[in-house]
Amino acid sequence: MTGKHPMRWVIAAVMAMVSVTFTLGAVEVNAASGAVDGFDQYRDSLARAFKSGDVDAILDLLETGTSFDNVTLAKMLVGYGLQHENLLVHRGSIDLLSRAKNPEARQYLNEQAVKHKRWEKRAHCCRVISRFGGELAFGNLCKILEKEKKWQVRSAAIRSLVRFRRVATIDALIPRLRVEKGRLLSDLRWTLSRLTGMTHDPVFEDWSLWWKTKRDGYEVPRAAEVRDMLGGEKEKKQNLKTAVREGLYGPIYSEKVAFLLDTSGSMLAGTEEGTRMEIAIRELSRVLENQMTDDTYFNVMPFSKDVYPFSSKLQRAKRKSLEVALKKLPKLEAAGETNAYAALKAAFDDPDVDTIYVLSDGSPTIGDEHIPDLIRLRVEEWNRDRRVIINCIGFFPGEAKNQDKESARDFLRQLASDNEGFYKEIY
């Protein structure tokens, strides 16, 4: 992952000969000759690397950081690692914090999940403390559900609670179905389903009625048992007739959603129900007509060689905006290549979007970035704080000339998995 750098031994030698004192944000670091122990030297090297912006040095030090488990290291990583602009540094900091066993460090991280002044760090700390388990972490995650104002932090807490496979977790989550709305209903359904194996819609009355009949003596199934119970819920394959009957998109819970619609040339492939393009237009029109409410904000973003959003930002789903979108949809024509990167970037450029639907029949072929793994990496960078769900529909009925379905399938499946969404394949 990183290269080893000859400068590291030079830095260590210099640190052994001179005394250096500097302040990095709120953390004061003293690098004195004749360090008391190994951690002093490690701490000073890590502080120097953060201050200088030497990413390779930071990554090398994070790899060896498991040898030092204390609250000082935890404070440095929360202070400078969690929000570091480099994605690998962010990942490494999360991983190292999640390995903490020191009681003082764990106490500190639990406190930060609840009260850090930056909501992004509260959200990341939710995911960290969920790996600790125990009553302290469980209590703090439940407290966040009740007290936290930022929906992204509540989202992190809801999904983190899936690690606490206990009756009390279900007791805490079901009442939130009466309180939360929009995107967070998806999070609640996801967590409750993976705790119980049940697939009710995120409706309080449905879950409450079920729980009243099951709670006494209930044993939360193991994660492996739930996976068997859910089967292919997260990755569903349907023939075209079944998919059209049930609706390609399924229920839309989000109230701030962007629909990315592939209009590349392969969407001209014919089926018994019409071309892929014709079916996709009908199905998206059906969603706009039947599932948008006055509380919903939406945008449609067709893409082929470029992206052509219907509007510059999310529009409230009132009569006029819906009529405009419904008139534009039938006029779309399929042609050109597949610039998935531009479409995803346009969706993330709107700060209000919290859920993205991608309907596509191809892997990326053009754009500022067209290598699937690198697009996924860029999306991870954009989404590490946003918590946008990306649901993907692989639309493959009929046959398109020279189409690599396997590559398209892999890209869409992994994109959805990376971003807590579902993947549905239509054939």
Image (tube, rainbow, N blue to C red):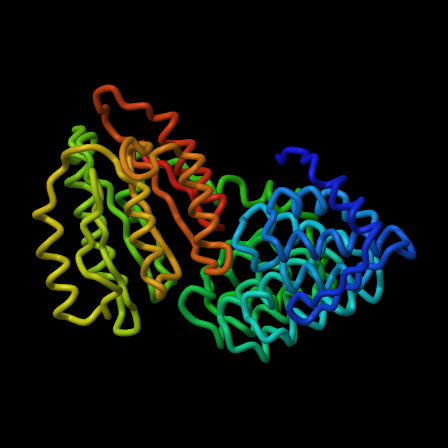
Would you say 154 lies left or right of 242 here? right
Q: Can residue 189 be seen at all in this image of the molecule?
A: yes
Q: Position of residue 324 (x, y in %)?
A: 11, 62
Task: Please identify the residue farthest to the front as the structure is shown.
Answer: 18
Percent of width and height locating residue 355: 38, 57
In percent of width and height, residue 422 lies at 44, 46
Total numbered badges shown on the rendered structure:
0
Q: Is residue 77 above or below residue 244?
A: below
Residue at image x 37%, y 36%?
425
Rendered view: 272 above or below 226: above
Depth check, front residue: 222 or 314: 314
**Quarter occupied by residue 135:** bottom right
Q: Residue furthest top?
A: 402
Q: In this view, which residue lies farthest toward the bottom?
A: 147
Image quadrant where one finds the C terminus = top left
Of residue 94 and residue 49, the one placed in the foreground of this image is 49
Comparing 233 with 418, the one in front is: 418
Left or right: 245 in relation to 44: left
Q: Residue at x 28, y 67 (%)?
A: 297
Q: Where the N terminus falls, by quadrant?
A: top right
Q: Is residue 353 above or below residue 269?
A: below
Q: Is residue 241 visible?
A: no
Q: Is 249 left or right of 54, judged from the image as shown? A: left
Q: Position of residue 240 (x, y in %)?
A: 28, 36
| Residue at 60%, 61% in the rendered image | 124
Q: Is residue 182 left or right of residue 154?
A: left
Q: Nearer the viewer, residue 179 or 336?
A: 336
